[in-house]
Amino acid sequence: MQTTFIFLKPDAVQRGLMCKILQRFEDKGLSFVGMKLVQVSEDLAKQHYAEHAERPFFPGLLKFITSSPVLACAIQGP
């Protein structure tokens, strides 16, 4: 078994798509081992997206990812 991290970004949360998206993972036989609704801080966003810091889209990316909560999940499967 392997475990990996996924997160549903602000637009998925705002549009009410969380259940539909999570169902797709379950339909593929994956299991959720952890889940948390999180408001991403600017510091965490900068750390997570550090490889894009020099890109022209970086400020917009930070604004988007910190605009509302995200759903952070750990999923497990073969």
Image: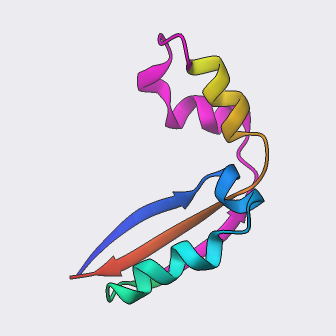
Task: State which quadrant residue 31 falls in.
Answer: bottom left
Image quarter where the N terminus lies is bottom left
**Residue depicted at 44% across the width and 79% down the height:** 24
**Colouring convention used in this rendered image of the protein:** rainbow
Q: Nearer the viewer, residue 8 or 33?
A: 8
Q: How many marks?
A: 0
| 23 lies above or below 63 | below
The part of the chain drawn in magenta is: 33-57
| 36 lies above or below 60 | below
**Residue depicted at 78% across the width and 41% down the height:** 67
Residue 25 position, x and y percent, is 41, 78
**Residue depicted at 61% across the width and 29% down the height:** 61
**Residue depicted at 67% across the width and 40% down the height:** 65
Q: Nearer the viewer, residue 16 or 39?
A: 16
Residue 28 position, x and y percent, is 32, 84
Q: Is residue 33 left or right of residue 69?
A: left
Magenta includes 43?
yes
Magenta includes 36?
yes
Task: State which quadrant residue 66 falls in.
Answer: top right
Residue 68 position, x and y percent, is 79, 49
| 45 lies above or below 18 | above
